[in-house]
Image (cartoon, rainbow, N blue to C red):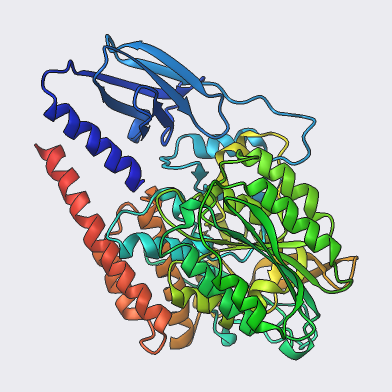
Amino acid sequence: MMRTLLLALLVGWLSCSVLAQQQTYFRGEVSDESGNTLQQVSIRQLSTGFLFKTGMGGRFGISSNAVVDSFYFSLEGYQPEKWSGTADAFLQIRLRLLPSSLSNPDRPRLSSRTANMSRQDERRAFIGNETYTSLIENAWINTTQYPTTGLALNVDRASYSNIRRFLNRATFVPADAVRIEEMLNYFPVPATSLASSTDTAMFKVGSLLGPCPWNWDHQLLQVQVAARQLDLDTLPASHLVFLIDVSASMDMPNRLPLLQSAFRMLTLNLREKDTVSIVAYGGITAVLLRAVSGCEKDSIMHVIDSLTPGGATPGESGIRMAYQLAKDHFIENGNNRVILATDGDFNVGLRTESELDELITSQRAKGIYLTCLGVGMGNYKDSKIQLLAEKGNGNFAYIDTEREAEKIMMKEFAQTLYTVADNAYMQVSFSPNWVKQYRLIGFDNKVSALLDSLCSIEGGEMGSGNTLTALFELDPTDSLWLAQKDHRNELLAQVSLRYRSTLDTLPQLRMAHLDANQASSLLELRTHQFYAAVALFGMKLKESSQVKNYSWAQLQLLVDQVIDGAQPLQVEFAQLVAQAAARYEPKKKKRSAKRKG
């Protein structure tokens, strides 16, 4: 985003400086075949190589020093189009949907889905909404028609640290970087929020029901699912393959050096029965260490410290080599995992997301997990790294600071590297007696997945001690308000968890009931409203139409009321909200002034 902005400014500066050159201005609009305008379409100006994006209403305006120029239009899920000509008239660019590939089993996956809702109804729910990225915000669902919604249990947290990086650099956050479920998952859930359960239970389920701060006529249901915490002393033996990008693009302080620090921290947690292999890819792709015991920390550290950046980014060959090592040294009933650390800028071998999807999907059936660590800015490829983690039965984190590296590799060591449940999937079924309609906050789907009539939802992976938080905004019936007023303990919703334990091949099912009682204690209400504030923060950054009448000042006031000053992560969150408010509020005022003018 920043690079695109700088390039656009550079074009403008050059156009003002070289007065002798002829200047033309290409204006137009991009839409689909039905006439629906498309935002965030990539526009490559072929005469300069500069990259632009369509804005609100699919509009664009690009200056050129040539009378005749060419542009390349592309958007995920659509057939790219090339246009050449002169700036004689307002351009009308139409992008066609890519045809479905019926023979390809590895289709884009949904993050959530309402049971029994037709694809036509799903499309109708989002086509009219204002969107800024390839992610489509979940719509309101009528409970009588569609009482059940399911979601994959993936506990990734990369979005929050990436958002923090943008705000700490005093820049706007790209809407496609905001994934609210990952923001919620970044913060640990108090143990008191979870229902009591035996120590041997794979999952604990808890819920809190409380007011919705941006619409007092609604309520917010907070659902938590916590995976069992394994004893660190009894964790199975691991074979970890460190797959480290050492290409030229990693030659920055916040890239390779940050990853080296992260892997040093991870090495300190290794035991004698654990083994480590190291593959580096850049100018060359090579195995630097092969199945060395975790007690040989000096040898591992020496290889990590000796890494130097340079060359291209042959991601395909690196991935293939890492998976081959994992296969050669596979530990039966152990933890076999590739840890890919990169800025995601693959430029040699497989490059497209569909090609990477096919490669990783072919490997995951071998029982090898994948953890992805993202770093960098400017050319950071979030979508590629997220896809690799999703298809590789793994997780995804973004490292922006040494402190984040410590959090992931030291404090959350077991959560990051030890999976306790595969293909984990949750369904929540609401009672029409108490809920008129509901909306899942976060877990938004890609446009390409929703438009593909054959795509499906796929379960996720839960690590040791992982906790997932899901928020539903509810439009309650009058009966629910009366039941709560009379303190009647009614069944609000039913939760079903489907998963497969890593110790058992048979699928498992766990049921839980959520009642209609609201958060009663001050601690419960404060916890509930803190997570509401996190979700609100995400929606404000995405400029969601759901909170268009809720100001940044109101959000700051809410945050000040609900944060726990003894929790460093919550204190930092309040600081980020203040930074965002200072950055986004002037933009809003400026727009208002323009409209009045």
Q: 71 above or below 474? A: above
Asked whether residue 142 is in view, the answer is no
Q: Nearer the viewer, residue 482 or 270?
A: 270
Q: Quadrant of residue 169?
A: bottom left
Q: Quadrant of residue 480?
A: bottom right
Measuring from the top left, give residue 274's x and y in whole percent.
Answer: 76, 79
Residue at the spot 53% in from the left edge and 70% down from the top edge: 260
Q: 447 above or below 519? A: above
Measuring from the top left, give residue 124's x and y in whole percent.
Answer: 54, 34
Q: Nearer the viewer, residue 147 or 338?
A: 338
Residue at the spot 48% in from the left edge and 52% down from the top edge: 248
Q: How many marks?
A: 0
Q: Nearer the viewer, residue 214 or 156?
A: 156
Q: 304 above or below 60? A: below
Measuring from the top left, give residue 192's x and y in whole percent.
Answer: 58, 87
Q: 527 above or below 9? A: below
Measuring from the top left, give residue 321's x and y in whole percent.
Answer: 74, 54
Residue at the spot 75% in from the left edge and 41% down from the top edge: 106
Residue at the spot 83% in from the left edge and 54% down from the top edge: 365
Q: Is residue 531 left or right of residue 356?
A: left
